[in-house]
Amino acid sequence: MNYGIKNGGNNNKSITNKIGGMETMDFPFNFDEMPIAAKFISDSFSRDIEDFQRVYPVFDDVFKARFAEQIRKAKDIVCCGPEGVKIQNIRIGVFRKIESLNTLILETQDYFPISRIKQYDYIVEIVEKKNLSSILSIVPNLLQQLEANMPTQNEDVAQSIIDGIRSIYQVLKLDRIELNRLLNSRGLLKEEVFRCLNHLWATMQDVMEIGQSLYRKDDPMKCVEYELNYIKMKVKTFWMHSVPDTVD
């Protein structure tokens, strides 16, 4: 087994349709989220390094240092500088707005005939997952349904909920436009970005794969920490609890 350690850690596990803009890379995280996700994986690995070494001696302090250096380089490329700070601040703001949107949507249960709102539970589920593109795709339909089912009582409160949802939706649309602009502008580095993040992603996959293999039977709780869905959840939690201009 190679585990992406030889040849600079690049075993071509990442795929791209073309080496170009930010949106072409086949990574499970946005570019600026890659160092954050990698840091969560690295923290678990550092804690469990003795278990890794017992089975695969190559996962030693040298590997640990190489992983840390890959994270540092990735952060320097995609997170630092004025644009990197703007990207992180927008992401933090987006997740806070989604939290507010979720609160308003849940409040509709108190004032609207929810039984008439098609796929209401699905809409709530989508918002709670905090995927910006999915949220922007379902909110217009929700607004149409709410307006078509305006209650006869507490109409002013119901209207304020609709106005609040619409306002957040409009701001989120603008946030996505600006976020994509900033992400694509960082794609000017092209090959350097691809090479750096491809190496990092290969290492992340190696550690996740071995971590799951080590703990799947004996320690399911630790195993979860090396699963992709858990790491994605950790990244979302990171944005929700971060403070603008202070992201490390």
Image (cartoon, rainbow, N blue to C red):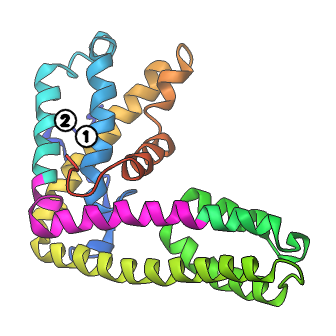
Q: Residue at x 38, y 35 (%)?
A: 208
Q: Residue at x 75, y 78 (%)?
A: 158
On the question of residue 246 being in view, the answer is: yes
Q: Earlier in the sequence, mark 2 or mark 1?
A: 2
Measuring from the top left, give residue 211's x and y in whole percent: 40, 26
Q: Residue at x 11, y 34 (%)?
A: 66
Q: CA distance from mark 2 to mark 1?
A: 7 Å
For this view, does 68 lie left or right of residue 179?
left
**72 falls in the magenta region:** no
> Toward which corner of the image does residue 194 lie, by quadrant?
bottom left
Measuring from the top left, give residue 130's x and y in whole percent: 53, 61
Nearer to me, 191 or 223: 223
The residue labelled by disc 1 is: 203
**95 falls in the magenta region:** yes
Q: Residues within 10 Å of mark 2 (few under 14, many from 20)?
A: some
The amino acid sitting under disc 2 is Ile
Region of the chain picked out in magenta, as a range: 76-101
Q: Residue at x 10, y 39 (%)?
A: 69
For this view, does 33 lie left or right of residue 100?
left
The residue labelled by disc 2 is: 5
The amino acid sitting under disc 1 is Thr
Are the two marked residues, 2 and 1, in contact with CB atoms closer than 8 angstroms? yes
On the question of residue 11 being in view, the answer is: no
Measuring from the top left, give residue 97's x and y in whole percent: 47, 66
Q: Quadrant of the N terminus?
A: top left
